[in-house]
Amino acid sequence: MQLRAREYKLLLRSDLLGDHVDTEAAGRFRERLAAIARSCCLDLEGAFARDPLRAVRFFDVPGRSLTGRGFSLQSRRAETGTGPGEVVLGLRSPDRFVVAAAELPGRSPGATTSFEEDISPLEVQSQGRRVTVADPPSIRTRFVLSTTVEGGQALDRLSDALDLFPTLGRYLGPPGEDEPLIAGSAIHEKIFRGPRIGLRSGFVADAALTFWTFDPPLPVPRIAEVSFRVVLRKGRMSAGAARQAIRLFAAMQTDLPPELRSPSKTALALPPERPA
């Protein structure tokens, strides 16, 4: 498949934004992000505005065989309870060709599939087992194929996921359709969008600030992430725009306190692993 976009994601230390993130707090963070952009000779335009609140939950079977094979399964709906909600199946791998060759159709007329590149900091571990961001800052890339199906279907057993995504079984080996799906802690998702950064050749980086809070018993109370997404043209990005984007992302890693406990939000939101 053809790449649709590249998204640069940086998990932030949760105390950077405080316990409560509102439009005012997002505005203060915007000024910090604008200063980083200026240091890279780029301009950040526009203000953060909050999207409708969403409830998010991740699922896996007891032995985490979905996660072990690079898949993630989640449900999303408006926190107000209005609207049908959606179920998303994603396949993630550092190997572009493995992901691009996968087939993940949804059993729904309105199902949509997207192929994107996720870019995060390259983390290194010292002999003392301490994890740090690489110096000089660099990147780690993973490719993601995701299919979204609208609706409020229950996800109680693996067979429910196989009904929604009919090809999933071929990637899991002998399907244990009766296996229960375990839900992770309920996530309350707050996203702020709006600021944009113009790059060379007319490419644009759209910034977002995502804030997750969890219901008990998850020990991680909250997660914050700043990201910017660049939509590609026929799967391509100009060299000039790519150089500007990587320079900006390196500056963000240097100037913002990163969270180094996990490579992604998803890894912190998975249900607890149980014996298969």
Image (tube, rainbow, N blue to C red):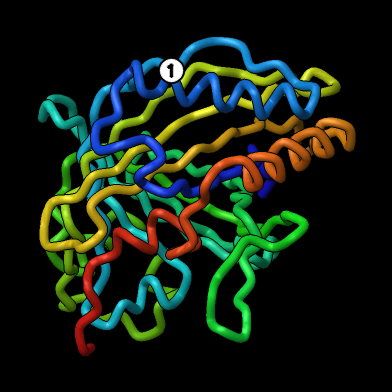
Asked whether residue 166 is in view, the answer is no
In depth, the one of 34 and 231 nearer the eye is 34
Picture coordinates of residue 85, whole percent (x, y): 22, 36
Residue 132 is drawn in which quadrant?
Answer: bottom right
Picture coordinates of residue 259, whole percent (x, y): 46, 55
Q: Residue at x 21, y 79 (%)?
A: 62
Residue 16 is drawn in which quadrant?
Answer: top left
Asked whether, in this view, residue 26 is left or right of residue 177, the answer is right
Amino acid on which disc 1 is placed: Gly
Q: Residue at x 77, y 23 (%)?
A: 199
Picture coordinates of residue 8, whole percent (x, y): 61, 43
In depth, the one of 142 and 34 nearer the eye is 34
Q: Residue at x 66, y 49 (%)?
A: 1
Mark 1 nearby-residue class (10 Å; few <14, some 14–19, many ≥20): some
The residue lying furthest to the right in this view is 239
SS for callout 1: helix
Asked whether residue 182 is in view, the answer is yes
The residue lying furthest to the bottom in this view is 275
In depth, the one of 204 and 16 nearer the eye is 16
Q: Residue at x 51, y 21 (%)?
A: 30
Q: Give the number of callouts.
A: 1
The residue lying furthest to the top in this view is 46
Q: Up-down: is 39 above or below 178?
A: above
Picture coordinates of residue 9, whole percent (x, y): 55, 45
Asked whether, in this view, residue 222 is left or right of residue 217, the answer is right
Residue at the spot of label 1: 27
Q: Up-down: is 146 above or below 234?
A: below
Give the position of the C terminus as an image quadrant.
Answer: bottom left
Asked whether, in this view, residue 182 is left or right of residue 109, the answer is left
